[in-house]
Amino acid sequence: MAALSSAEPTTRPRAPLPAGRAGRPPDRATSLAASLRGLAAQERRQSARLARSAVDAVGYGALLLASMSVAADAYADAVSGGSGSINAPSTGPHTAMPSLSDLAALQSVVRQLHAVIYGYQLALGRLSAFTPKGRRALRTLAARRRLRDRLVESLVSRGAVVPAAAGAYVPPVQPTSAGRSATLIRRIEVAFQPYCGVWLASAARVEDRRLALATLAGTVAEARSWGAATGPWPGWRD
């Protein structure tokens, strides 16, 4: 628990944990459920601290803090019995993240949002609007459209080129059933996360980093709601 008390994860806690007899933590008759609730609360508090630090940071240092913030939320959800699971850290080679300008990263996100929206529209052909999954997909589609329109307005106001949507996209999964539609949405949400990460790392303004962080956190949560596992570094390519 002491490791969760600082917003700087590389800082070793200086204050020792409360000790009982013989220097051991005091024994308490605490149920497993209460312990898990306490752990989840600690993770959420740490997530909030890291998020504030991420918004004030710049470059890939901002993404590092944001990634830990989003992961802490996922851990809290996992120990609270939420959907999805947690993947173990990869030990293989990692893919380098690109270095983009503020506007180039924003344009990249808009391009991906065009594809995300197209994929959701395909998936909804097999998801009834009268089911929980169908309603959730419709809400997320509406949110993705609002985000795209907001970012398009930002590009226009800054005199930048707005990427156009392609005529069609090739989905990684053909949504021929409700189950395959759910798989398609899960894969879309997972694939979108690194673009949010690059956007956050490239954002020059605090308000843009705040929006990018909120988008990354929302995308990870959405992917988990469709059964995706959360990796230890959300927003990075691997």
Image: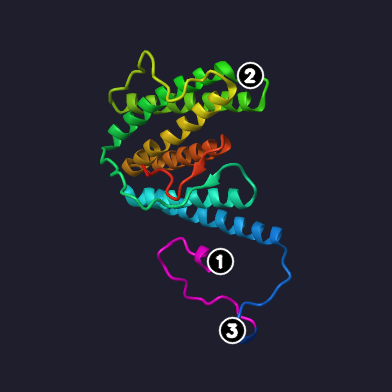
Front in this rendered view, residue 167 or 164: 167
Task: Indicate whether residue 18 is drawn in magenta.
Answer: yes
User: Is 122 situated above or below 67?
Assistant: above
User: Is 218 situated above or below 135?
Assistant: below
Q: CA distance from mark 2 to mark 1?
A: 44 Å
Front in this rendered view, residue 77 or 88: 88
Label 1 Cα crowd, 10 Å radius (few <14 / some 14-19 / many 20+): few
Label 3 Cα crowd, 10 Å radius (few <14 / some 14-19 / many 20+): few
Please give the label number shown on residue 1. 1
Please give the label number shown on residue 128. 2
Q: CA distance from mark 3 to mark 1?
A: 17 Å
Residue at far bottom of view:
22
Return the residue at label 3.
23
Q: For the residue labelled by badge 3, is the local secondary structure a helix, a strand or a loop?
A: helix
Q: Amino acid at mark 3?
A: Gly
Front in this rendered view, residue 178 or 52: 178
Residue range of the region highlighted in magenta in the rendering: 1-20
Q: Amino acid at mark 2?
A: Ser
Upstream in sequence: badge 3 or badge 1: 1
Residue 103 % position (x, y): 29, 33
Q: For the residue labelled by badge 2, is the local secondary structure a helix, a strand or a loop?
A: loop
**Magenta segment main secondary structure:** loop
- Depth check, mark 2 against mark 1: the one in front is 2
Please give the label number shown on residue 120. none
Residue in view at x 28 percent, y 25 percent: 159
